[in-house]
Amino acid sequence: MNERRVVITGRGVVSCIGNDVDSFWNALVDGECGIDKITQCDASDLKTQIAGEVNDLDVTKYIPAKEARRMDRFSVFGLAASCQAMEEAGLPNYLPDSDIVDPTRVGCVVSSGIGGLATMSDQHKKMLDKGVSKVSPFLIPSMIIDMNAGNISMRFGAQGPNLAVVTACSTATHSIGEAFWMIKRDDADVMLCGGSEASIVPLGLAGFCSMKAMSERNDDPKKASRPFDAERDGFVMSEGAGVLILEELEHAKKRGANIIAEVIGYGATGDAYHITSPHPDGDGSKRAIEMALKHAKINPSEIDYINAHGTSTPLNDKFETMAIKSALGDHAYKVSISSTKGQTGHGLGAAGALETIACTKVLETSTVPPTINYENPDPICDLDYTPNVAKEKEVSVAMNLNLGFGGHNGALILKKYTE
């Protein structure tokens, strides 16, 4: 039996720098930043008052307004990105009505790191102010993380594997990786996968502020997220969604789908070290890279580009750099790296999907997006982070890295599709 190959045939984006793939990518290449003062809630009492908010999303293009009001914002984002991805993939709006695909062979792993925090916060306040009888019957279905995949599967009639992965900021990367394996082991032919997040609410912001994890550059939002820069002082929260369509190669070819890239490797490991800090020598991330390389059956020297987790926190950027050096050896100094979080902020459970989509565009365009706000080189972070300006480079193999609180590490490897 021939090995089942997994390709990408569709993508969808909701982000603070664009609400479709092309606008998102053009903003990345141009170095645009979507971080600004928070408008969704009163952040005046918080030490961090900036974030990457989604603006100008016409929800009614994807979901009836009444239906959207019954969903948390994170689910709305996930469904909007899924509609885009299905359209790009040329898949039908409702799978059971089509003879193009078998709906029982189409699954969904679209997840979230935090889920419906806004709904939970609002309904908790309503209960305290007006009593338990005023709590919405939609509280639980709006809040729970798995409803992201549930809503998407119901929208399209996808009856295959359906679940959510929760691994903090590695959520979307692990969701894509687990969907990859579902197709590899013949549990599905098509998978919607990725992540969404919408946690720019007082409770979420206050929690991260109390941890002293976020930047406090409130007077200069566009310069606040500065991955790998010596003066980085924390991440900037953002919201949004990224969804990809993974498909078994022969299935995609049979229906004449446009093949964007191929997924060839996935690694997932645990630090078993600390609730928030990465392992101090980057060991967990290093092993995730090595696992992905093993499954991809390639050498470290074949990696051309890395979209790094690059959160702009002092510890992450230091330890991630160490992990890349340890896993790639001397080649670490030759590979092009960028962190797009300088522009998008940190999308938490959506980050890995948005950044994997960026990798697909790198493969398509031979353009490496910049790491903006890289102004003060850090001797500890001494690799090629593509400072401030995009560059042209032929890229055949790209890797995305993500790390999450709890010691979760994920690595995905993509390559240009060839027969």
Image (cartoon, grey):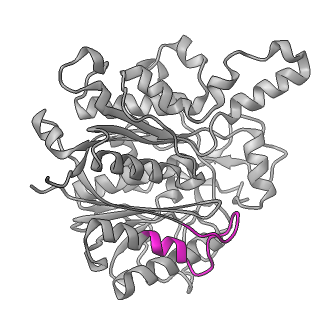
Observer-nearest residue: 186 or 174? 186
At 85% across and 21% down in the image, what residue appears? 127
- In this picture, is 94 found above or below 18? above
Q: In this image, 347 relative to 327: left or right?
A: right
At 48% across and 37% down in the image, what residue appears? 163
- In this picture, is 381 found above or below 157? below
Observer-nearest residue: 70 or 154? 154
Q: Main secondary structure of the magenta part?
A: loop
At 53% across and 72% down in the image, what residue appears? 284
- In this picture, is 83 found above or below 194? above
Specify the quadrant of the image occupied by residue 250.
top left
Q: Is residue 14 visible?
A: no
- In this picture, is 121 found above or below 414? above
Q: Position of residue 130 (x, y in %)?
A: 89, 16
Q: Is residue 187 visible?
A: yes
- The answer to if 127 sits in the magenta stretch is no
Which contiguous range is marked in magenta? 270-288
Q: Position of residue 106 (x, y in %)?
A: 32, 32
- Looking at the rendered image, the quarter that the C terminus falls into is bottom left
Q: Position of residue 216 (x, y in %)?
A: 73, 59
Q: Position of residue 399 (x, y in %)?
A: 36, 64
- The answer to if 272 sits in the magenta stretch is yes
Specify the quadrant of the image occupied by residue 326.
bottom left
Specify the quadrant of the image occupied by residue 335.
bottom left
At 54% across and 37% down in the image, what residue appears? 54
Furthest-front residue in this view: 1
Q: How many marks?
A: 0
Q: In this image, 29 relative to 274: left or right?
A: left
